[in-house]
Amino acid sequence: MGREVIIACDFASGQETLRFLERFGEARPYVKIGMELFYAEGPPVVRALKARGHRIFLDLKLHDIPNTVERAMRALSRLEVDLVNLHAAGTRAMMEAALRGLTREDGSRPRLIAVTQLTSTSPESLRDELLVTEPMEKTVLHYARNAKAAGLDGVVCSPLEAAAVHRACGADFLAVTPGVRFPDSRADDQKRVTTPKLARELGADCIVVGRPITAAEDPAEAYGRCVREFV
Ligand code: C5P
């Protein structure tokens, strides 16, 4: 998998998503479908975007007992998406079960990556609510190693963690990174942001970009700018 710019289609309906993607003309960017859109529209929206020719990252962050995750992943695997994810906190047994569920009879499967720590979890809540006394960065790398040991293809992380993830898990272990902004765009609710150019320099393999593209006056131009800087 080469470097990719993935557009986070955080829209409330399939109609809104299709209207947005029509602004790209003949181009078929790689898109991310998250919980909001998937829970609103279900598998038909995935099939519709697939039929249009988009590659799809289905960002549903599964976290449950291994048997349930295995069966859920089997259902997702039939949607022919390209990339799916889960929470590394579900343990190695859950991640291994997920891989079994994703793998089709012919041995093919979507790529699978793990969320380590949510970027919304602060060091204080990690310690005081979750009772994890190790530092955040150490837990992120430890979870990444668990994901690697379970056979996963990579993790979702901050661009600032990409180099450390590659050092811990190898150069071909994917670092898929949100939190990307142009120097002249708003940070919104993202705390630690990097530009597409810096994300590339820091070693990110894929960037997930939402509002800098979805809220741009000319989304195709903003997407092109990401591709020029990152790919
Ligand atoms: O609009 P923006 O570029 O901030 O969108 C980033 C996307 O990446 C959103 O869909 C968000 O849910 C997702 N994401 C994130 N931080 C994480 C994991 C996912 O921003 N740690």
Image (cartoon, rainbow, N blue to C red):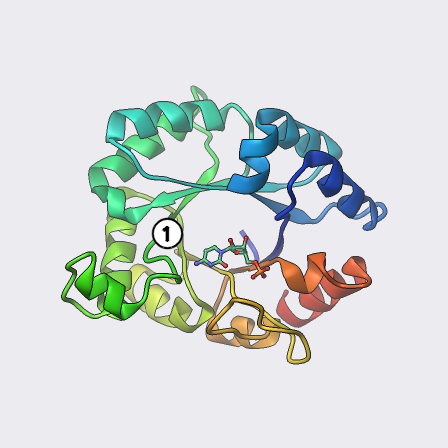
Q: Please tell me which residue is depicted at 76% across the width and 45% down the height of the picture.
A: 21
- The percent position of residue 118, horizontal first and vertical second, equals 37, 57
- The percent position of residue 36, horizontal first and vertical second, equals 55, 41
Q: Is residue 136 left or right of residue 112?
A: left
Pick out the residue farthest to the bottom.
Answer: 183
- For disc 1, the marked residue is 115
> Is 143 situated above or below 43?
below
The quadrant in which residue 197 appears is bottom right
Q: Please tell me which residue is depicted at 29% across the width and 48% down the height of the picture.
A: 88
Q: Is residue 222 left or right of residue 101?
A: right
Amino acid type, residue under disc 1 in the picture: Val
Q: Does mark 1's beta carbon lie closer than 8 Å to ligand 1?
A: yes
The quadrant in which residue 117 appears is bottom left
Q: Please tell me which residue is depicted at 39% across the width and 61% down the height of the picture.
A: 120
- The percent position of residue 187, horizontal first and vertical second, equals 58, 72
Q: Quadrant of the C terminus?
A: bottom right
Q: Please tell me which residue is depicted at 59% across the width and 41% down the height of the picture.
A: 56
Q: Secondary structure at mark 1?
A: strand
Q: Nearer the viewer, residue 189 or 25?
A: 189
